[in-house]
Image (cartoon, rainbow, N blue to C red):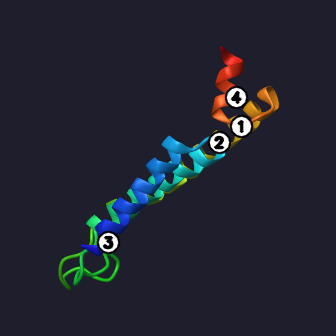
């Protein structure tokens, strides 16, 4: 139970960082935090005690499904790529506008 409360707290922290940040970098960190918390939540849901590893043996009991772990590794790689892309876009925004604050950028756009 405490695991799920921790995940909920981390997701809420990420949403807080996105909504109330005045800086683009803080919003990107909040987005990455939410992504990490969702991966953690998925791993917690798939946690089964008492099962054997799929490699260890056939006939020794119920084997753990390796598909969720493979999907989470894929999600981690995609999340890292998205974070790198958003950081690169924020660098381009900084070079164009001279700031990373949302308010100043939207003032210059209007």
Q: Earlier in the sequence, mark 3 or mark 4?
A: 3
Element carrying mark 4: helix
Foreground disc of the pair 4, 1: 4
Q: Nearer the viewer, residue 56 or 69?
A: 69
Q: Quadrant of residue 100?
A: top right
Estimate the x, y position of residue 28 in percent, counting from the top left: 59, 46
Q: Earlier in the sequence, mark 4 or mark 2?
A: 2
Measured Cα–Cα span from mark 3 to mark 4: 39 Å
Q: Earlier in the sequence, mark 3 or mark 1?
A: 3
Q: Can you identify the residue that label 2 sits on?
A: 23
Disc 1 to disc 2: CB gap under 8 Å: yes
Q: Nearer the viewer, residue 63 or 10?
A: 10
Element carrying mark 2: loop
Estimate the x, y position of residue 93 in percent, counting from the top left: 73, 31
Q: Can you identify the residue that label 1 sits on?
A: 100
Foreground disc of the pair 2, 3: 2
Q: Can you identify the residue that label 4 sits on?
A: 104
Element carrying mark 1: loop
Relative height, residue 83 to residue 107 (above, below)? below
Q: Can you identify the residue that label 3 sits on?
A: 3
Q: Earlier in the sequence, mark 1 or mark 2?
A: 2
Disc 2 to disc 3: CB gap under 8 Å: no
* Number of residues whose C-alpha sits closer than 10 Å to that of mark 2, classed few (under 14), some (14–19) or many (20 or more): some
Image quarter in which the N terminus is found:
bottom left
């Amino acid at each position: 139970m405490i695991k799920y409360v921790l995940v909920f707290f981390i997701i809420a922290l990420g949403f807080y960082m996105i909504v109330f940040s005045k800086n683009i970098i803080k919003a990107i960190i909040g987005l990455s935090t939410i992504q990490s918390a969702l991966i953690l939540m998925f791993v917690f849901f798939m946690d089964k005690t008492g099962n054997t590893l799929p490699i260890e043996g056939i006939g020794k009991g119920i084997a753990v499904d390796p598909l969720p772990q493979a999907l989470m590794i894929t999600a981690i790689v995609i999340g890292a790529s998205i974070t790198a892309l958003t950081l690169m876009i924020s660098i381009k925004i900084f070079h164009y506008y001279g700031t990373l604050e949302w308010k100043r950028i939207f003032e210059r756009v209007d």
